[in-house]
């Protein structure tokens, strides 16, 4: 092969390698700084979305939980802990969602600020805690409370809370990089406008429905249900690794048949055996509903966001609840 052909061949290989690097989606970034931007580490996907929306290109926002994994079950390895320690700010969901974060925050260096986002939103008690508090004869009983506290940690599914999260990050990022304050305020305002539009779509889309009961395999949709005046029934509690008793399963089957419900939802990224079993027993169909704790590689490749996934959730809810 002559020199000219070698040069051409080498150029083609280089172009292919560069193209693969450019188009390969990466939710998690390496900790080796490639520029002088401040680094912020976040835990859940909803925090990543809000942080990126506010930061734009002014801050290097990095996700901790790997793509496609069950965020409930995640625990950082020593390398990931070291990465967080190098960040200027660590933002976690709180409300008992990440047990590892509660322990980690006390060991971080003074150079790493810590934000527990659950302290900046409106929390509501989980289905289990409400039954206990009111002394009701709960149709669904769970014995394990250790994974989460009294409050339901899936608060980002209430769009008002997503707005509060965005406002909080605007304030915190302004403290980190005051020179970019105007950019943060502008980005925040644009994203909040989009969130308010989404909230309006939910209000109108779920205003008139034949059925207003949302049954899922995991108690992750309480905020979404409450914000839209839906009844929320979950087969298992706030811990995604819980297994329902035969009594609980029988009760849910009875409820589904009694109300003539046609759809059982299961949380994406966790085992759907429970919902599939109930669907088989009742003749209903089992459909995935995205709680936005994390996303899959396929969702990232197709450029899915909080806004697009929430709209897809709305479409599924409208169909399941026979909304006009």
Image: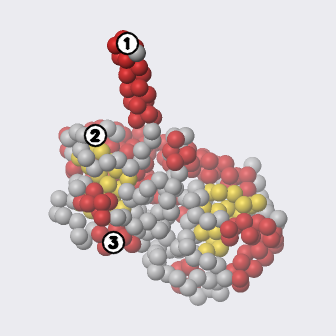
Whole-percent x, y for residue 242 in the image: 57, 76
Real-space Cα distance between discs 1 and 3? 63 Å
Residue 245 in view in this figure: yes
Q: Nearer the viewer, mark 1 or mark 3?
A: 1
For marks 1 and 3 on the same chain, the one whose residue lies earlier in the sequence: 1
Task: Tell whether 128 sits left or right of 116.
Answer: right
The label on residue 102 is 3
Real-space Cα distance between discs 2 and 3? 28 Å
Considering depth in this image, is 240 or 193 the residue closer to the camera? 240
Whole-percent x, y for residue 228 in the image: 60, 59
Dot 1 corresponds to which residue? Answer: 2
Task: Tell whether 269 sits left or right of 165.
Answer: right
Q: Quadrant of residue 277?
A: bottom right
| Residue at x 23%, y 39% (from the top left corner) | 35
Q: Residues within 10 Å of mark 3 (few under 14, many from 20)?
A: some
Real-space Cα distance between discs 2 and 1? 47 Å
Q: Secondary structure at mark 1?
A: loop
Whole-percent x, y for residue 289 in the image: 62, 57
């Amino acid at each position: 092969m002559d020199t000219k052909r070698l040069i051409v061949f080498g150029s083609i290989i280089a172009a292919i390698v560069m193209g693969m690097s450019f188009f390969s989606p990466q939710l998690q970034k390496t900790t080796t700084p490639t520029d002088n931007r401040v680094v912020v580490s976040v835990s859940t996907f909803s925090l990543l979305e809000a942080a990126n929306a506010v930061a734009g290109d002014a801050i290097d926002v990095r996700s901790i939980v790997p793509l496609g994994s069950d965020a409930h079950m995640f625990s950082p390895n020593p390398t990931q802990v070291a990465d967080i320690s190098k960040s200027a700010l660590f933002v976690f969901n709180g409300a008992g969602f990440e047990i590892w974060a509660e322990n980690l925050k006390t060991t971080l260096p003074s150079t790493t600020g810590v934000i527990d986002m659950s302290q900046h939103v409106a929390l509501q008690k989980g289905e289990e805690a409400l039954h206990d508090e009111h002394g009701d004869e709960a149709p669904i009983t769970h014995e394990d409370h250790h994974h989460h506290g009294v409050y339901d940690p899936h608060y980002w599914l209430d769009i008002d809370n997503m707005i509060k999260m965005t406002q909080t990050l605007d304030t915190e990022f302004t403290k980190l990089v005051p020179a970019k304050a105007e950019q943060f305020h502008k980005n925040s305002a644009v994203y909040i406008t989009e969130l308010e539009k989404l909230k309006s779509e939910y209000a109108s889309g779920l205003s008139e429905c034949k059925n207003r009961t949302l049954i899922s395999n995991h108690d992750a949709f309480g905020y979404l249900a409450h914000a839209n005046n839906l009844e929320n029934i979950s087969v298992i509690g706030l811990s995604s690794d819980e297994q329902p008793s035969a009594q609980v399963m029988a009760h849910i089957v009875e409820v589904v048949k009694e109300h003539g419900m046609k759809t059982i939802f299961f949380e994406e990224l966790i085992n759907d055996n429970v919902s599939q079993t109930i669907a088989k027993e009742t003749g209903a169909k089992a459909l995935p509903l995205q709680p936005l704790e994390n996303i899959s590689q396929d969702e990232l490749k197709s450029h899915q966001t909080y806004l697009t996934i929430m709209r897809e959730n709305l479409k599924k809810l409208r169909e399941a609840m026979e909304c006009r």
